[in-house]
Image (cartoon, helix red, strand yellow):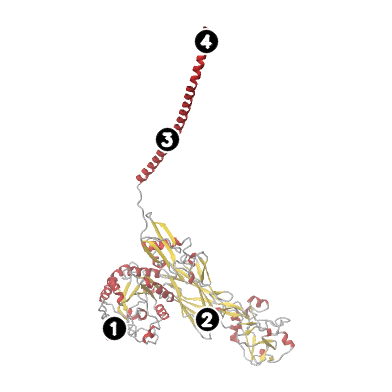
Amino acid sequence: MCMSGSATSCEECLLIHPSCAWCAQEDFGRGRGLTSRCDFIQNLQRRGCGAQFIEYPTSSISVLKNMPLSSTGSGLAQFDVVQIMPQKISLSLRPGEQTSFGLQVRQVEDYPVDLYYLMDLSLSMKDDLDTIRNLGTKLAHEMGKLTSNFRLGFGSFVDKNMSPFSYTAPKYQENPCSGYKLFPNCVPTFGFRHILPLTDKVDRFNEEVQKQMVSRNRDAPEGGFDAILQAAVCKTEIGWRKEAYHLLVFATDDVPHLALDGRLGGLVEPHDGQCHLNDRNEYSASTEMDYPSLALLGEKLAENNIFLIFAVTKRLYVIYKNFTALIPGTTVEILDQDSKNVIQLIIAAYNNIRSKVELSVWDHPEDISLSFTATCQDGKPLPGLRKCADLKIGDTVSFNVTVEARGCPPRGTDQSFTIKPVGFKDRLEVAVDYQCDCGCSQTAQTNSSICSSIGTYKCGTCHCEPGYLGARCECQEGEASSMYQSACREAEGKQICSGRGECSCNQCRCFESDFGKIYGSFCECDDFSCPRHKGILCSGHGECHCGECKCHAGYVGDNCNCSTETSSCISDDGKMCSGRGNCVCGRCQCTEPGAFGDTCEKCPTCPDACGTKRECIECRLFDSGRLADNQTCQRLCKDEIITVENLKTDDPGAVLCLYKTDNDCVMKFTYSEHASGQSILTALKEPECGGGPEAMTVLLAVVGSILLVGVVLLAVWKLVITIHDRREFARFQSARSRARYEMVRMIPSAVEHCLNVFGTKYNNTN
């Protein structure tokens, strides 16, 4: 592997593979013909290279700051709370060699919380505004159960006050609701208005909210993303504390305008990501710049450690759920039409945020590959995962980070990157330097006599001046002989320089190619004849070396198209592919018959389908069951649930599920998958409960049944006996009649016989 490369210097040797070493001994290989100085350490030593002449740098790690993790976020030491360990390390990396380090993260208890409530005050949110007028007191009471240091702020938004987003006619400037019969009076349209800085005086929140009035815009989408960005970057005006969790609650009932929508109104200048609040605390650049992009929003939210909570109505859930996949640290919750559930929504979102830890990487150098392995509460390492979920406050999780440098940056370049949990102020700073130079290069000799005085002697070899070749620069280019050419064949019968170069002074000089670099002692290698994926060499995730892809960290396969990242395979319940498949190349391959979906989460025909959906029915409809106890219902159960009086079971694509409740009732629901990909549960409003019979009633019924059966059996027996006796009696009567008839018929004969006998005796007497 080392000898087949094109290394002509120590530095080139080190880049071939992290197992390669270089021998800088002057007389190494003398008398052995062509001998490569680039090889494994054991091979170099076996061929006579002294250990002191071997150049073999290795990667190393130095921990520069390692303060212990804190256990609580309150008290006198709240400014020194530590939630990640270590805090600063230094890496010395040899290109191609993987090295690993570990870090721990803990969500401390009783950590301060700053919550900024950002509300849509367009006309359709009027009933919501009425609902939250006393929100401050109630919310502070509930949040007081979770943290002893809570502050609350308030802001509002509508949309850009320009056509076509708002009504711009003069009569609408002071009252955009003019002529609107349902609600004829409202305040002028505005983009974003910062009303109350973060404060622990919740009564002020109530006072300011009660002063607010709704406004009106023209089109359905709102200018909410303008407001989110201003709330994120105007740190001083809003009052975000460095040592607190930052929650930004975004309440709306419609979709937002996105970047490029501003061009409809002639706004071609992209958003600059800066704070633009005037002395009235209103967004002054609303009619000057376009709406911000999702990428800019994500960047600024992460930069300021803000957790964004989308509180949206049910019909918008899918849209905002898609936004959360593009903006790290964002969650979405379903808001009732009049915002009645806003407190429960915020508490659920807060618990959801505190139940997970996800790492993000900042200022990631392009020539460094990172891969993560998470070890969560179950103690099992999860390769490719940088997130842990279902945590309790105070839990500690560990991550192992594998680092690999793919090359060497220009000399003098300092590299660094930062690893931080999403939404945390804590971070791990990583400084990087590269092991790209050999120690023997520092003693190089120019115009050395060893190199015929026309080359530089460095690390055991001569680097000749242009026009000269040979181990000692003893040949000039163009000289050729059969003796020289024999050393340019890889084996007898092979082409000179593999047919891709010319032999000059015992050495192959490889041709140039438009496709890439041809190299090797016999020009047998190149950096372009490797497997491709979709036309891209090594899929863009590896380097081509002599016909073989050397994959970057985090990728495997012949063409490096297979990612080892598994975070995309983790389902909402924290299981790999929902326990119904395997994660292959970053995608779930469902093995359970009937399972489908990105994480195999959909499976109406699976044996456990009813059991899984039952837990959601229990917690969503009746606030009971396992999921309601650990407050994960809102996070895990996002399916649409339709309640009905009578459940229809004639849908062939639906699965009927039944279960027995704690009070011996029967709950029925059907589970089906809509063509849009959404799971739909149709359930009875209430379980079916029949009136339970009393024990005495049951006893009497059983005894009565037994008696009834006995009477029936006796009656049957009596009937059978009676029929039998009557038949026998009839037979007897018939026999008796026949006997009497025979007797009567025989009387005349008998009399005649008697008379004859008597007459004979009488005559004889006479």
* CB under 8 Å between discs 1 and 3: no
Q: Amino acid at mark 1?
A: Arg
Q: Is residue 277 left or right of residue 30?
A: left
Q: Earlier in the sequence, mark 3 or mark 2?
A: 2
Residue that label 4 marks: 761
Left or right of residue 415: residue 550:
right
Density class for disc 1 (Cα within 10 Å; few <14, some 14-19, many ≥20) is: few
CA distance for labels 1 and 2: 47 Å
Residue at mark 1 to residue at mark 3: CA–CA distance: 106 Å
Please state which amino acid type lies under the numbered disc 2.
Answer: Asp
Q: Going from the N terminus, do you reach mark 1 or mark 3 first? A: 1
Q: Mark 4 or mark 1, which is nearer the start of the sequence? A: 1
Q: Earlier in the sequence, mark 1 or mark 2?
A: 1
- Indicate which disc, 2 or 4, sits on the residue closer to the N terminus: 2
Q: Name the mark nearer the viewer: 3 or 4.
A: 4
Which residue position is annotated with label 2? 367
Q: Earlier in the sequence, mark 3 or mark 4?
A: 3
